[in-house]
Image (cartoon, rainbow, N blue to C red):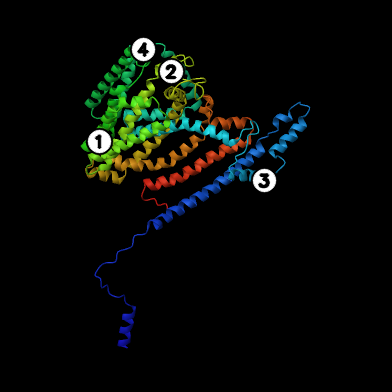
Amino acid sequence: MATSAAIDVRDTSTPPDTTGEAAVPQKPSVFRRAVPTLTFLARRILSSLLVLLGATFIVYMLLSYSVDPLEDLRTSTAPNRDALMAARIQMLDLNTPAPLRYLHWLRDVLTGNLGTSWRTGQSVSAMLSSAIPSTVTLVMGAIFIAIGLGILVGIVSALRQYTRFDYGVTFMSFVLFSLPSFWVAVLLKLWGAIGFNNFLRDPQFTWPTIVIVALIFGALWSAVIGGTRNMRWIIFGAATAATALGMYLISVTDWILNPGLGIVGITVLGAIVAFGLTALTAGLDNRRALYSALSAVVVGAILYFPLQAMLGRATWLMIFLLALVAAIVGCVIGWFFGGPDRMVSMRGAAITAVAVGVFVFIDRVMQVWQQYNAMSQINNRPISTMGAQTPGLQGDFWVTTLDQFTHLILPTVTLILISFAAYTRYTRSSMLEVMNQDYIRTARAKGLPERVVTVRHAFRNALIPLATIIPLDIAAMFGGAIITERIFSWSGMGSMFIQALNTQDAAPIMGYFLVTGTLLVIASILVDVIYAALDPRIRVDS
């Protein structure tokens, strides 16, 4: 029996490890690691397509039973009214039940045919191809400026909690958030266009205006920077004096009528960006990062005059390629400075180089300001309130770019003011919640600088709630800022939708809804991906 037991033990035991090395677990292949993510994306895309399919069906049914394309003919006194009604019924296939017409519409969409407007005879695809770029031009700058300013002001407001600056930001946010967009747009047309165009006849600042504006800016910078009482008074005095001096020089030199940055202005602004970006991301004690950013400014200043001849034949493709080259040059500068954290220097130098390129671009646009104002179509009233461009205006790339910019100012500012208030409130509340977490107190207890605690530990986690809001807001804005487009006569997606709704034209409405619905579906998928990128605790394969 003993022998039998011994045999059983030997047969069921694991053979001894004769190599003397511990077993190393095999790392899964890239394909195996990608399978859960791809499965998640496929599942989300499929479910989103089903939601979009159901939504389009509901909208199509609502349009079929609420829109009457025969309304104008029913009250017509034409002798051939019955023949006209029969022809329209046949053209729109109104004798077919609405669910079957939806299936026909869906079949055409899958083949790339979005239908035709029976009012204008124009294909919906052609209407969208002209409306979408117009809306993108209007919305793109506004939404990103609103996001950037809203996040920045919200963070500063949270860090200055219960100060005068925080109370002021809270008050202004609630005021802007409650204002109707049409009222803001009308006020901007009255003061921002008519008032400023009248001011351009004799652009001189009076001394009471200079004093009031200087005091406001002094108080603002004092509240933003903060510090001890003496420090706040020093900041207030310096900001007030700098603002008053700047307004005085602008007034006596007629800079408004003939503006420009020049190599000196570009260098100063580039240095401010270099110092500010380095202080925010790396700290001014990181000399390699600071010198990398400043070197990018120096390179931009050296290339200022050679670039002027090249920019005389500019196109948007050339501008994009130059921006790409600027980023590459900045990365190369940061790489040469090296250091233990080379990526920080490369990133700072690249962003600074692109910023300097933006200043060069703005300066080149300013150079045609006087020529643009003197044109007969402009007549020294450059700020426009209607449309996307001046009819009949002839000019080179820079004149047309400036014309587009002057038409964008008022609608863009309208969208920024409304969206900025919401992003400020979201960011402030999210930042305050994060700053009270245990890991923030632990980071401070370890002796980390406040910049590191705020930027590297708090800021990223504060963005997680915003990841839900921003993509959906962007998608909704691309659907068309309907009221803003209507007031400023901007022929975008919103105007196309309103016009089709007023004329009871179902095909453009369905095309509009298909585009906006698709964008919202894509945005909802991006929300999940951004969540996983910002928070490592969230897994897309769960």
Upstream in the sequence, badge 2 or badge 3? 3
Q: Is residue 429 left or right of residue 101?
A: left
Q: Residue 292: which disc?
A: 1
Nearer to the camera, 449 or 391: 391
**Kind of residue at badge 2:** Tyr
Marks 3/4: CA–CA distance:
68 Å
Q: Secondary structure at mark 1?
A: helix
Q: Quadrant of the N terminus?
A: bottom left
Upstream in the sequence, badge 3 or badge 1? 3
The image quarter in which residue 167 lies: top left
Q: Position of residue 272 (x, y in %)?
A: 28, 28
Q: Secondary structure at mark 2?
A: helix
Asked whether residue 465 is in view, the answer is yes
Q: Which residue is mark 2?
A: 372
Nearer to the camera, 181 or 341: 341
Marks 2/4: CA–CA distance:
20 Å
Upstream in the sequence, badge 1 or badge 4? 4
Q: Secondary structure at mark 4?
A: loop
Marks 2/1: CA–CA distance:
38 Å
Marks 1/4: CA–CA distance:
40 Å
Q: Residue 63: which disc?
A: none
Asked whether residue 286 is in view, the answer is no
Upstream in the sequence, badge 2 or badge 4? 4
Marks 2/3: CA–CA distance:
56 Å
Outermost residue toward the right in this view = 79
Q: Which residue is mark 3?
A: 100
Q: Quadrant of the C terminus?
A: bottom left
Looking at the image, do the residues carrying marks 2 and 1 touch, with CB atoms under 8 Å apart? no
1 vs 4, front mark: 1
Q: Which residue is mark 4?
A: 204
